[in-house]
Image (cartoon, grey):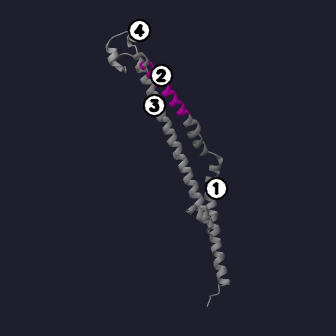
């Protein structure tokens, strides 16, 4: 099993390595959480645009004129009853198209809502939790405390070395 800088830093004698490893890991996690939240918000916006496009397509199935999806049928100039009577088997095809568009729109709208409510929202909310705020507030003071501790330990080690020199082996 390979170890990472994050894992290896806890085996070191220097506290700043552990502090930096945790700090870097939390900073990266926060950045990924922010980016994922943005990604899913954008994905939901694309779903919303798709649902709106499907609604326009559905309305064009029922409209006449230049915006119609079926301009060749419109060009025949039949009223709705004559058209339906003469369509025969094609009437089922048209009805199936209409229902398929509606069902597809409902599925994508449901997906959009789930993405916002169950993914993007919780990710975005997690960034405002008190734990993150407490971490951000304490990170600076903890960093300076770690540096101060290490400077003190360096001084102690220098004094120890001068008072109790390490004997040399022959």
Label 3 close to label 4 by CB (< 8 Å): no
* Residue position marked by numbered label 1 in the rendering: 138
Residue 138: which quarter of the image? bottom right
Question: Alpha carbon of mark 2 to alpha carbon of mark 1: how far?
Answer: 57 Å
Closer mark to the observer between disc 1 and disc 3: 3
Asked whether residue 101 is drawn in magenta, I would say yes
Question: Alpha carbon of mark 1 to alpha carbon of mark 4: how far?
Answer: 74 Å
Q: Which of the marked residues, 2 or 4, is nearer the chain's N terminus?
A: 4
Kindly state the secondary structure of the residue where label 1 is placed: helix
* Residue position marked by numbered label 3 in the rendering: 50
Q: Does residue 59 appear to the left or right of 11 in the view shown? A: left
* As drawn, 121 above or below 72: below
Which mark, residue 52? Answer: none
* Residue position marked by numbered label 4 in the rendering: 81
Kindly state the secondary structure of the residue where label 2 is placed: helix
- Residue nearer the viewer, 85 or 54: 85
Question: Alpha carbon of mark 2 to alpha carbon of mark 3: how far?
Answer: 16 Å
Q: Magenta stretch: give its range.
A: 93-113
Q: Which of the marked residues, 2 or 1, is nearer the chain's N terminus?
A: 2
* As drawn, 92 above or below 9: above
Q: Position of residue 25 (x, y in %)?
A: 57, 56
Q: Does residue 9 appear to the left or right of 45 in the view shown? A: right
* Residue position marked by numbered label 2 in the rendering: 99
Q: Position of residue 162 (x, y in %)?
A: 65, 83
Q: Position of residue 10 (x, y in %)?
A: 62, 64
* As drawn, 1 above or below 89: below
């Amino acid at each position: 099993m390979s170890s990472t800088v994050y894992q290896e830093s806890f085996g070191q004698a220097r506290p700043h390595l552990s502090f930096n490893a945790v700090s870097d890991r939390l900073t990266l996690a926060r950045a990924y959480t922010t980016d994922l939240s943005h990604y899913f918000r954008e994905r939901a916006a694309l779903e919303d645009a798709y649902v709106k496009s499907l609604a326009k397509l559905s309305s064009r199935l029922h409209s006449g004129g230049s915006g119609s999806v079926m301009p060749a049928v419109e060009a025949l100039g039949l009223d709705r009853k004559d058209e339906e009577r003469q369509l025969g088997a094609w009437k089922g095809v048209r009805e199936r198209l209409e229902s398929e568009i509606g069902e597809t729109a409902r599925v994508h709208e449901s997906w959009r809502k789930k993405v916002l409510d169950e993914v993007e929202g919780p990710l975005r909310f997690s960034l405002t939790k008190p734990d993150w705020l407490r971490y951000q507030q304490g990170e600076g003071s903890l960093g300076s405390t770690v540096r101060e501790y290490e400077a003190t330990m360096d001084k102690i080690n220098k004094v120890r070395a001068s008072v109790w020199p390490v004997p040399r082996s022959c």
